[in-house]
Amino acid sequence: MTTQMIILNGGSSAGKSGIVRCLQAELPDQWLAFGADSLIDAMPARMQTSDGGIEISTDGEVAIGADFRALEQAWAQGVVAMAHAGARIIIDDIFLGGAASQRRWQKLLDGLDVLWVGVRCDSAVAAGREIARGDRVRGMAAAQANIVHEGVHYDLEVDTTHTESLTCARTIAAHVS
Amino acid sequence: MTTQMIILNGGSSAGKSGIVRCLQAELPDQWLAFGADSLIDAMPARMQTSDGGIEISTDGEVAIGADFRALEQAWAQGVVAMAHAGARIIIDDIFLGGAASQRRWQKLLDGLDVLWVGVRCDSAVAAGREIARGDRVRGMAAAQANIVHEGVHYDLEVDTTHTESLTCARTIAAHVS
Amino acid sequence: MTTQMIILNGGSSAGKSGIVRCLQAELPDQWLAFGADSLIDAMPARMQTSDGGIEISTDGEVAIGADFRALEQAWAQGVVAMAHAGARIIIDDIFLGGAASQRRWQKLLDGLDVLWVGVRCDSAVAAGREIARGDRVRGMAAAQANIVHEGVHYDLEVDTTHTESLTCARTIAAHVS
Amino acid sequence: MTTQMIILNGGSSAGKSGIVRCLQAELPDQWLAFGADSLIDAMPARMQTSDGGIEISTDGEVAIGADFRALEQAWAQGVVAMAHAGARIIIDDIFLGGAASQRRWQKLLDGLDVLWVGVRCDSAVAAGREIARGDRVRGMAAAQANIVHEGVHYDLEVDTTHTESLTCARTIAAHVS
């Protein structure tokens, strides 16, 4: 059986994007990568200020509206279709709803062979990296560090607190068949 | 009948991205936007230096390899699936193969209601805007300005040479049902 | 006499950055470019949310605080020093205070040979380009289009409403000695 | 005595930018930050492809030409002038010439109170982070990791191999008077 999709879940500033780029560099095939950031980029700019969209409060709390959820659902179906069409896909997502977010993906996967990966990072360390990035609302990393993993089942977990992105990526790559 | 997808085709620096952002702002529904740039962002970085990927020569000629084409094909199928799942989609593409590029899309569209839009720009003007952007290899705009439209059929054409992005977007929006 | 500094003034989305990149491409010497955007990038991120920094209201009004002004003043002195040290410098600025902003520069220039350039753009056109950029708070372009020019004296004015960046740059370049 | 400038030196991908942003967040005053990246952004785009500019070979070797050096020298004088004008300044630089690069700065500093900081990172770890960033030519991190420190004297050294940016920044901040 061949891994068709890798889904990484972790809080903001846990280090998902770095792992994704290392996975794309390390894996012998060409994998396409999508995620929460590229989805938001694909949406109208007004989704970031309107009801129904995504609102990030000044303390880093994220509220997701109905319009956002509807687009996200169709987007996820399309990403699954890319995998069925033969592309190998890496997703980095933030399961704000924990187990419920995972179930939303599972309902769409339709027989795909998926590797589920939890990307953990100590809350205080992620909060520090959020400051070092400089382009994120402070508070998101701490708010999300734990709740995104509640009730979620993984094939594999990595922890970036003391482990480099490339090392995490190699651990994940070893589980790709 | 409801327009489910808008496909914009035009050469590099013809002004497609600006029109897309204006369309997203002007259209009453929330449309997702994807295109050549976001596809390349989703690919491994090495695709921009490897055989099989995309190579841009120092004079702006673009060569597309087999690996790129395979990922692009699966990506396009996924984008079509997003539209079938209910998302309204805007694509900005560069039909380097002219009519053959359009046929590749048409084979996938499977009954979707698509609005085909040609985005033209005078070659010299596009070349000037390429300099003003500062982040593109010079020569792409001039090399692509005309060939991307060869043999392509549109519902509508706009020309950014003397018309602002917002005005072009409103013209297009008037054709969206 | 040799032009040592070019100072462009115009409202947000009037097209200053595009003109700057074209000037850098067209002028035979190597010119360094700085401006309002690069200054903000050099400041702590918290300057964009704190009293004393720069605050952009949701309708595009910009308020500048005392800390911002102090850093800006020292930055401007440094930029002038670069010119005295032999670098040719292009500045793109937004004279929110009109004539008073120009006088702040003039007090620092200390014998430098400066070419003052007004970059105008019809307010409605600039507002449309603001939408096309997608990364600016809407309202800034319209709010600034005229006030930044009030009482300011120029050697030369260009208007991007109907003229391309590259053409404007060539007009300016013809006045550089 | 008050620290007027902090100069960080380290190889590409050693983690300088993250430390700078943390310093700006942690230090009570407002510090301006400049460095190799912002200098290159200020130069004409053609400096990255021309003789006299900066050339990065496909294996990550960096060659600096005479035009680049001349602009850099004037830029450094201007940055020093900003500090004399009262702005507190953080510089992140890459001393490709080791001790000679430090001497170039020292000749300009003219009585300023400078805190010299070495930012070290294990070569293999920096090379891994270069992959995780995805936007750098591979090989730069490894090529520069050690040579930039040769013969350079510091007030303080930090090592990002096993220490977070924020922790390094706090160590540095404790030495700022």
Image: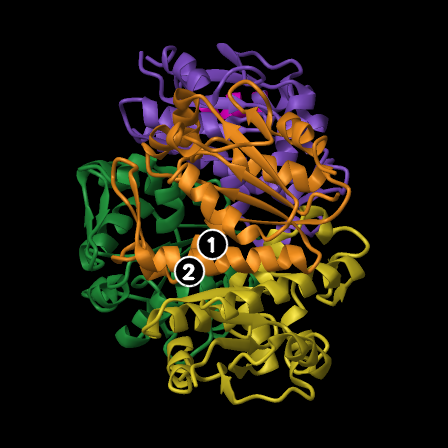
Chain colours: A green, B purple, C orange, D yellow
Foreground mark, 1 or 2, reads: 2
Which disc number belongs to residue C39? 1
Picture quadrant where residue C7 is located: top right
Q: Is mark 1 on a helix, strand or loop?
A: helix
Residue D58 visible to the viewer: no
Q: Which label was assigned to residue C71?
A: 2
**Amino acid type of disc 2?**
Leu
Position of A73 with respect to B154 (left or right) is left
State the residue at coordinates (29%, 63%): A11
Q: Judge whether C36 appears above or below B30 on screen.
A: below
Image coordinates for residue C166, horizontal then vertical, percent: 65, 29
Q: Which of marks 1 and 2 is nearer the N terminus?
A: 1
* A4 relative position to A123: left or right: right
Q: Does the magenta stretch include residue A163?
A: no
The answer to whether marks 1 and 2 mark residues whose Cβ atoms lie closer than 8 Å is yes
Residue C48, quarter of the rendered image: bottom left
Q: Which mark is residue C105?
A: none
Name the one closer to the observer, B122 or B46. Answer: B122
Residue C43 in view in this figure: yes
Of A158 and A64, the residue lying toward us: A64
D75 sits left or right of C128 in the view: right
The verdict on a common chain for dots 1 and 2 is yes
Q: In the picture shown, does residue A166 fall above or below B47? A: below
